[in-house]
């Protein structure tokens, strides 16, 4: 009996030591593990370069990369765990992008991810990196992202925000800027509605679509060119859209097809 008790003490003590060691390793887990996770989750399209610190407090540079692994754009990012949230069974981080003075909250739990009050910008060339069919157009200008709220529980998404493409232009046309465009997204616990509109510019874009969690978003876009710019912009638009006539063009934006224009059923051979 004495020997059994002794062995029990040894086993319990060993288990406690192993658990403490596991916690010790987890606390000191390097930030480079985030790069491994991003790489696997996005097929190498997002990477965390120059990672420093740990999973719980660190910094690095989030990079958008093309299919060949070349960096198209990067933003400095830093994160810090908020320990009090552990009592609520979740991980709360304060995240800053591009050395911003104000951090935004990132909340993680086994079933949910949520961010709010996110603001940052990217060069528009990332569109050519994210959508290879757009790369020859060399998109230019600035993409400004504002997310009031984004939450995902499995495939169910809640989103409220807007992306603005300021002073949009392209190396494929001498007309610059083409305009400034706004893509709004809004939805609660279901399909997210997408709305595209033109704020200003000679190339007028409008459209809409939906985004369901677990599938890429899709947009149906119409473009209209004023008579004064048709001679210059028609060859450019023919690269990415279906010509309807009288300065009107149509494009069905489907990321699964690389952003290629897709004719409607009446236009298919």
Image: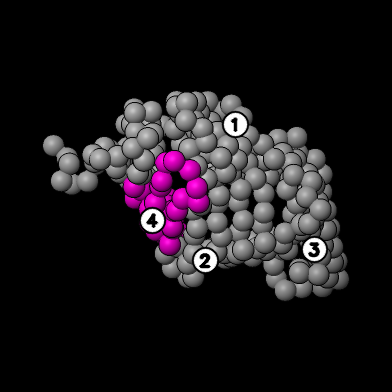
In reply to whether residue 219 is colored magenta, the answer given is: yes
Answer left or right for 195 relative to 69. Answer: left
What label does residue 208 carry, if any?
A: 4
Q: What stretch is highlighted in magenta?
A: 193-222
Tell me the distance, in whole angstroms, between the alpha carbons under discs 4 and 1. Answer: 27 Å
Lower position in the chain sequence, tag 3 or tag 1: 1
Binning the other alpha carbons within 10 Å of mark 1 as few (below 14), some (14 to 19) or many (20 upward) gives: some
Binning the other alpha carbons within 10 Å of mark 4 as few (below 14), some (14 to 19) or many (20 upward) gives: some
Label total for image: 4
Binning the other alpha carbons within 10 Å of mark 3 as few (below 14), some (14 to 19) or many (20 upward) gives: some
Residue drawn 22% across the image and 46% down it? 264
Which residue is tagged 3? Answer: 82
Tell me the distance, in whole angstroms, between the alpha carbons under discs 4 and 3. Answer: 38 Å
Q: Judge depth for marks 4 and 1 and give the one in front.
A: 4
Q: Position of residue 221 (x, y in %)?
A: 36, 48
Residue drawn 52% across the image and 45% down it? 180
Lower position in the chain sequence, tag 4 or tag 2: 2
Which residue is tagged 1? Answer: 72
Tell me the distance, in whole angstroms, between the alpha carbons under discs 2 and 3. Answer: 24 Å
Q: Nearer the viewer, residue 147 or 181?
A: 181
* CB atoms of marks 4 and 1 within 8 Å: no
Quarter containing the C terminus: top left
Residue 184 can be seen in this image = yes
Q: Where is residue 63 in the image (x, y as percent from the top left)?
A: 64, 37
Lower position in the chain sequence, tag 2 or tag 3: 3
Q: Magenta stretch: dominant SS?
A: strand
Colour pattern of the rendering: one colour
Q: Is residue 102 above or below residue 229?
A: below
């Amino acid at each position: 009996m004495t020997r059994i008790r002794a062995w029990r003490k040894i086993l319990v003590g060993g288990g406690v030591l192993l658990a403490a060691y596991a916690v010790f390793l987890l606390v000191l887990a390097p930030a480079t593990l985030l790069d491994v996770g991003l790489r696997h989750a996005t097929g190498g399209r997002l990477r965390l370069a120059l990672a420093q610190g740990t999973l719980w407090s660190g910094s690095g540079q989030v990079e958008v990369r093309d299919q060949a692994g070349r960096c198209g754009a990067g933003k400095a990012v830093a994160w810090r765990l908020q320990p009090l949230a552990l009592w609520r069974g979740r991980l709360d981080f304060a995240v800053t992008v591009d050395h911003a003075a104000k951090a935004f909250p990132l909340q993680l739990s086994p079933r949910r991810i949520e961010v709010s009050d996110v603001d940052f910008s990217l060069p528009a060339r990332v569109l050519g990196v994210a959508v290879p069919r757009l790369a020859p157009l060399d998109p230019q200008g600035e993409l400004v992202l504002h997310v009031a709220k984004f939450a995902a529980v499995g495939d169910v998404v809640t989103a409220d925000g807007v992306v603005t493409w300021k002073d949009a232009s392209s190396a494929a046309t001498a007309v610059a800027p083409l305009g400034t465009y706004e893509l709004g997204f809004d939805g609660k616990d279901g399909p997210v509605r997408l709305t595209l509109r033109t704020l200003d510019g000679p190339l007028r874009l409008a459209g809409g679509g939906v985004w369901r969690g677990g599938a890429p978003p899709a947009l149906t876009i119409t473009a209209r060119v004023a008579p004064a710019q048709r001679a210059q912009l028609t060859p450019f638009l023919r690269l990415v859209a279906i010509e309807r006539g009288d300065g009107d063009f149509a494009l069905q934006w489907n990321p699964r097809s690389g952003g290629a224009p897709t004719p409607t059923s009446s236009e298919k051979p």
